Amino acid sequence: MTHLDLFLQKGPANGDTVAGLEELRRIVLLDGIPSNSDGMSELRIYIWLILLNAPPLRTKAYLDLVGQGASPAYAKIRNDTFRTLTTDPLFRRRVSENSLTRVLNAIAWKLADANEARVNGWMSPPTLSVPPSLDGGADVFHSPASMSARHTRGSVTEGSEAGDGPSTSHAGVGYVQGMNVMAAPFLYAAKSEVEAFAAFDRYITSECPGYVRGSMEGVHKGLAIVDQILDLVDPKLAAHLLSKGMKAEIYAFPSVLTLCACTPPLPEVLRLWDFLFAYGPHLNLLCIVSQLVLIRDQLLNSPNPKPDFKPLKAQKVIDYTVNFARKIPDDMYEQMLAHAK
């Protein structure tokens, strides 16, 4: 029996939930979450929900969002979902495009409804009384084509699957290209769409609303901080990349936006996310710098360096990140904590 099994069996000592959460984080860091070679674990999604402090979600609440049919972002979602992790056979075998589409469309409705209510002071129309089948099909929602035809399809940078701004007509939080990749690990780890939706919704609304708001201001802030961190921990490498015009905004946009989910293999992404959800997604900025340092010789010896983080090596990245975190001054760390809010 692992330390994690014992912890989940006994619960926090003396009912101290704060101490219990700290113990859970320590176990995740030192022992990891037990999983097979495909990264599958019976416990992972539940531990993520605990670490994200995601409240329980009734299945009917998710079905109601699905039942609303195509959201204003539906066309863009369908333009993104088919290209999600296309080279990862593990993901393609476990997660259907229809499942990913439903979760993203439900998120888009929830974000759009919340934004309209906040801005205009009124709630959106009630959901349809009879939700469509959740079994998939040629059209996931069987809703009028005109609802999606009005929406402009965004371009996708090949390989990054992350890019432009929000697809809703609102300036607030909404669907942005790249959310398909952000949602992918949640669906892969979860046992149901409802679990994936609950975790993903909590993540984007609580941890990184700045990534999916307006012109993705949080992502751009994060990119600027990546440049600052690299200059602090490895000035020589930072100077070399800068001399070649390689600022973080050129090579790290997808990695910041998707919490490195764009970098295969997927089981390594899950391991990295265990650490990030335990100690804070803001540490992803340090993880990106860690990946640069891991290939520093390759970059320094190249007259035209192009950072390529594949394949992701989660444990090495975590080890470097923990070490670098000790070197970050308080003011920079505060920027890291706040950049995605």
Image: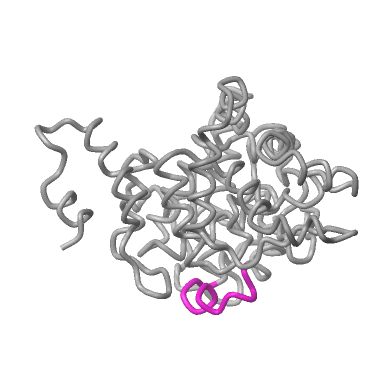
Which part of the image, by quadrant, shows the C terminus? top right
Expressed as whole percent of the image width and height from the top left, the position of residue 56 reads 31, 43
- Taking the spot 45% from the left edge, 41% from the top edge, the residue there is 202
Q: Nearer the viewer, residue 59 or 128?
A: 59
Left or right: residue 84 compared with residue 171: left
Expressed as whole percent of the image width and height from the top left, the position of residue 170 reads 71, 35
Q: Which residues are magenta?
A: 85-96
Q: Nearer the viewer, residue 120 or 339?
A: 339
Q: Nearer the viewer, residue 70 or 174?
A: 174
Asked if the stretch drawn in magenta spans residue 314, the answer is no
Does the image show residue 220? Answer: no
Above or below, comparing residue 55 to residue 42 in the picture: above
Residue 3 found in image quarter: bottom left
Above or below, comparing residue 11 to residue 171 in the picture: below
How many numbered badges does the structure rendering display?
Answer: 0
Left or right: residue 91 compared with residue 43: right
Expressed as whole percent of the image width and height from the top left, the position of residue 103 reads 51, 57
- Taking the spot 73% from the left edge, 58% from the top edge, the residue there is 297
Asked if the stretch drawn in magenta spans residue 87, the answer is yes
Left or right: residue 224 compared with residue 191: right
Residue 234 found in image quarter: top right
- Taking the spot 64% from the left edge, 39% from the top edge, the residue there is 211
Q: How is the image coloured?
A: one colour
Expressed as whole percent of the image width and height from the top left, the position of residue 67 reads 49, 55
Does the image show residue 27? Answer: yes
Above or below, comparing residue 296 to residue 145 in the picture: above
Which part of the image, by quadrant, shows the N terminus? bottom left
Residue 157 found in image quarter: bottom right
- Taking the spot 82% from the left edge, 60% from the top edge, the residue there is 301
